[in-house]
Amino acid sequence: MNILDTAKRIVQEGPICDHCMGRQFAKLSTGLTNDQRGRAIKLALAMEGDRLRKDEGDKEILEELSSSSVNARKSLRKEGEDEKCWVCLGLFEKLDDWAERAEIALKDYEYSTFLVGTKMSGLLSENEEILWTESEATHAEQFKSELNREVGKLIAKRTNKEVELETPDILVTLDLANEEVILQVRSVYILGRYRKFVRTIPQTRWPCRSCKGKGCEACNFTGKQYPESVDELTKAPVIEALKCKDTKFHGAGREDIDALMLGTGRPFVVEAVEPLLRTCDLKEVEKQINDQAEGKIEVIGLTFTPKGTIEALKTSKADKVYNLKVTFKEQIPEEKLRSAINELIGAQIGQRTPQRVSHRRADLVRKRTVHDMKINELTEDYAMIEVHCEGGLYVKELISSDEGRTVPSLTGLIGTQATVAELDVIGVDI
């Protein structure tokens, strides 16, 4: 079927605007907008009808083409002189209105790039399907693709911002059914390292076990198992600096709540959710966090980072260095202890999921390696033992054996129960 035959089918369905006509042939040429295509096609259809009326030919064909020609000529009238387009219901006459709505919605945000998307109404989707079926158009562009592009061009002109297809700062969605503009703002990500100097603070927010965060007597109606976390201690200054709705905390692993995080600190990313601003003075944010934390934690080296850093942190197999204060059920001769430690150096440790985390981790046997191990201090009451090991090793169970679930272990090698009384993380090698 040639272009004019398809166009004839289209105009017979009812009044149609230049945009909706041209969109049915969008894949057949370059350098033209759909409304330019549509007007040219309707003009050609009208001219062809006039030509055939002046020439001799089959009467039925002439009548059919004459009808199509009349419809085409009607569609060529200026806006407001004819019925509304039955396909878009006049939407393409209101592109400036949608661009203005978007500009108003965006006015309080700092951004460099945006992208327009469309949430179609049921009626408009149905109209498009009917047109494709009845016209048998095979070179059409989707309704929302043209709308996204045309409104995007108008927004760019109004705001002097750029359209970005891959990772826009803000996605502007045109909700046609509800006649509103919805913004989806890309998060801002800040990379840094933290040190934790107290043994009562978890890394992330921890809902109350009793009420699951709703608030009860057990948690003093706070909804929290612990009053503070590293997450919450970094939250307020980031919210203030970027005017965001909330933050999310992403750590490169985590230490137990009763463990210190020392040395060069643990890498983390704080995600600013729905920020009004996308830039700020991170040195000042760092200072604010550390001042407000009052010595409980310290953050260092804050810098803006892409979203992909989170995945890199989560999947990295960083080696860890721990300093352990170990106590023993019975007094152990120094030679026996040093011999056991030497056996663990370089050993591959088989660890069945520890009992203390079995409620949240799969019951598996994991293989991890101890790179180095040494005694830094030895008294009658305890030993200070430094362990350098592969990431993912449960170091408390390396010492205690977890009732035989970790093999080999220090407890198993010395023949009496050893327990980690205190644990400090002093290195995360990423």
Image (cartoon, rainbow, N blue to C red):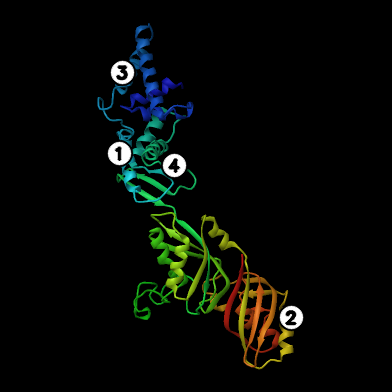
In the structure shown, which secondary structural element does the residue marked by tag 3 occupy?
Answer: helix
Give coordinates of residue 139: x percent, y percent: 46, 29
Label 1 vs label 3, nearer the camera? 1
Q: Secondary structure at mark 2?
A: helix
Q: Which residue is mark 3?
A: 70
For label 4, the residue is 162
Q: How far is the residue under mark 2 from the one under mark 4?
A: 62 Å
For label 3, the crowd category at 10 Å Cα-Cα, with few meaning under 14, some 14 to 19 and many 20 or more, is some
Q: Position of residue 366 (x, y in %)?
A: 64, 71
Residue position marked by numbered label 1 in the rendering? 97
Would you say the residues marked 2 and 4 are in contact, meaning their CB atoms lie under 8 Å apart?
Answer: no
Residue 337, position in %: x, y? Answer: 71, 87
Q: Amino acid at mark 1?
A: Asp
Residue behind mark 2: 342
Residue 177 or 423: which is nearer the viewer? 423
Are the residues tagged 4 and 1 within 8 Å (C-beta)?
Answer: no
Give the Cα separation between the discs numbered 1 and 2: 76 Å
The image shows residue 154 at horizontal and vertical percentages of 37, 37
Q: What is the total number of numbered labels drawn onto the structure image?
A: 4
